[in-house]
Each structure stands twice: as structure tokens, then as C-alpha cells.
Amino acid sequence: MDLWVPRVPVLAPALVAVAVVAVLVVARMWRCTCLSKTRVTLDLGRRVSVEDVIIGCSGLAGLFRELTEREAVAAVRTALASGFRSFDTAPHYGLGLSEKRLGTAIATLQESSPCGASGLSPGDSELTLYTKAGRLVRSYAELSSAEQDRVERENMRNSPACIFPATDPDLAPLLDYSGAGVYKSLRESLVRLRVSRVHGLRLHDCEQPSRFEAAMAAGGGVEALLSAREEGLVNEVGLGMNDPYWILRILREHNRARELDSVMMAGRWNLLDQSGMEVLRECEASGIAVQLAGVYASGLLVGGSTFNYMAAPQDMIDRTRQWQAIADSYGKTLPQVAVAFAFLPKVVTKIAIGVRTAQEVRRTQDILRSLETDAVPSALWREAQARGLLPRELDLVVVAKS
């Protein structure tokens, strides 16, 4: 019996060659697409001023160490006198303490100095307040057993993980990312702030599966934000989060996410951490403004010892020293470079700088004044990139034209 041997078409080698070329082309296209997703439009010649900065108010609640109410009021007074008009707070900060102190400061200054040194007049229409939703402040003793299961215990005063030591030990943060919870949180924030309305409302720290599901559900937190804006309760709505993974999931999975006005991303776009680059790209493509927080990496870039709200690891300390050396070589301070870097992406419309004291407010003003008249040179960014301190895919050659 003859053995059957299949005949191989003479064109097989050519077909294989074509297939190989096709695979290479597809691979190249895929690679280019992936690279384009990590790129953001930069503006290397941007000038900044106090109008571009939001005063972050977590420090008013005594972030990491206690702060007196007098010190908090003095910080707000100095900020207003220096021309700052935007303030960002949240129920999370000291379980209402930041909101209360900010509200007390504004009300006190309006009453005692209507047109004086505070720079604030009653009902100042230029005053822009932001707060957040996702946590309700409750007396722990009054919670039901079911509600106690929804308490964020690590942010209670008796927890070693609590970063607000002045928090009332009887209070607890009750997690609620439902639509009703967002409305309830807003109403309670207005009482603590002693105002009739705020400019902006953000969904805060929606970065765990249960929180995400509640926020994304029909009638959940995301829809409630949009409804609150439609009803005229606030002017601006968005997210206030840290983790790029969860931010991107909301932006890509909720069918109304592109209706959000802004995303405040904390700690993921600064000199030490650029893991939020894809969020910048996504927001730029979607027409959503970005407001950055954590531009000092929670302290390390401004002389502190913390990174991402914890003791700074050695590799980040070493990286900070490298940045310091580069800043020195160009005659800049590290905080100046940190602020300038935050403003590089064109999609970033504002940054939040946290302050605790009047001295920190004045330091912020000095940094902005210096950058307004003398921008950080493009050569600094290119040198940092050459040293491996910035991503290679960050395009530092093309300057965006306004």
C-alpha cells in the first residue's frame, strides 16, 4: 500500500512570509496604541498663580499631628488675604472637624471683617468650596449592629492607622456610597460648613469592590452626583480618589461618566509617582478636567518624612535626594519643581496644596509667585527623564500651544 504524502503548495513560503509581516504590523500597531494611551498633552511653558490652586483642608483637622482651632482659622485668614478663593475639604478629614473649622473660619472672618484684611466679604461670590461624599459621620454608640459592619474602623480615633489624632473618639465613619447617602452627606456637610451651598461635590475614596458597586449601581452615588448638579445644588461634580485602577473603572464602565466635570486624583502624579498617567490621558480624551492633590507626595517633597500617608521607604527617600540635586543644579527649590511638574499636563486645571498653618500658606504663595515670573526650564525635565526619574514615554519635546 502506497503511503500518502500531502503535497505542499509551492506558494506556502510566500504565504508564511506574508503572515509573518502581518503579525509584525499588527504587533507594531498594538504597541503604538498602547504607547499612545500613556501619553498626555504637556504645556512646558505654563505660568501659574493663586487662581490655579485649591487650598487643601485636611490639615485643618490636624493631619498627622493636632492643630488648634486658632491655628486653623489663622491659616484660612492668611489664605483669603493672599488671594486664594478655592478650598477643598471632606467629612473624612477628622470626621467633620476640617469642615467645621473651615466653616467657622469663613463665618468668623465674614462677621468680624466684612471688607477688611481677610479679603473676604459677606456672601463672597468668588468663594469656591468643594466637599466630598461616601462617608457619613455618626456616633458609634448609636449605630445598629448592621451599620457597625459598614464602619471604616481604621479611621476612628482608637485605631493606630488613624492619621487625624484630634478626631472625636466617639465618632465613626459610616460608609455609604448610595444615592441617598450622597444627598445625606451633602446636607450634613452644609451644616458643618455653615453655608447654604458648595461649588463642588466629589465621590470620595470609592476604591473597594463594595464601595464601587454601590456607587455604580442604578440610583447609586455616581448618578446622585449628576442629579445634584442638575437640581442646582452644586455647580461641579466629580471624583476624589487615589487609585488609578478604580478611577479608570468608573470612567470607562459607567455610562454617564463623561458627564462628570472633574477628577481629583491624589498622590499619583508627582515627582515620585506617575502611576496616574493613564487617568490623565483618559480624562483628556473625555473632556474631563483633572485637579491634582498630593503633589508633595504627602510630605516627602516638602521636607516631611511621609510618602503616601505613611513613613517614607528608603527608595523614595533616595529618589527625593536625586530630585533635590537636579533642582539645586537649576537654581530651583524642590517644592517649586514639584508644583511645576503637577501643572505640566494640559488637562490639569487646578492643583490642591494642603496647608495647616499661616506660614505654610505664605510658603505656597511664594512658590507660585516665583513660578509665575520664572518657570522651571524644560531642560530640567529632560535631565530628570534621562536619569530615569520620569517615564520614557512622557513626551517632553512637543510643547502644547494654548
Image (cartoon, helix red, strand yellow):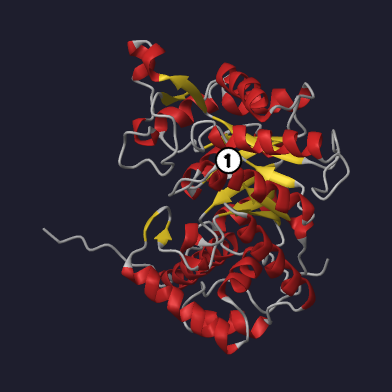
353 versus 202 height, above or below: below
Q: Give the left or right position of residue 167, taking residue 104 as reference.
A: left
Q: Residue furthest bottom?
A: 329
Q: Give the left or right position of residue 220, taking residue 230 as reference.
A: left
* Quarter containing the C terminus: bottom right
Task: Please give the name of the residue rendered at 52% of the width and 73% of the height, measured from the top-left corner.
Answer: 390
Tell me residue 21's x, y (percent): 49, 72
Tell me residue 119's x, y (percent): 83, 48
Residue 288 showing in the rendered view = no
Q: Amino acid at mark 1?
A: Glu
Task: Please give the name of the residue rendered at 78% of the width and 71% of the height, measured from the top-left corner.
Answer: 372
287 versus 220 height, above or below: below
Tell me residue 178's x, y (percent): 53, 21
Q: Nearer the viewer, residue 229 or 131?
A: 131
Residue with the mark numbered 1: 69
Task: Please give the name of the residue rendered at 70% of the width and 68% of the height, measured from the top-left corner.
Answer: 366
Q: Give the left or right position of residue 393, taking residue 305 as reference.
A: right
Q: Give the left or right position of residue 315, taking residue 115 as reference.
A: left
Residue 105 showing in the rendered view = yes
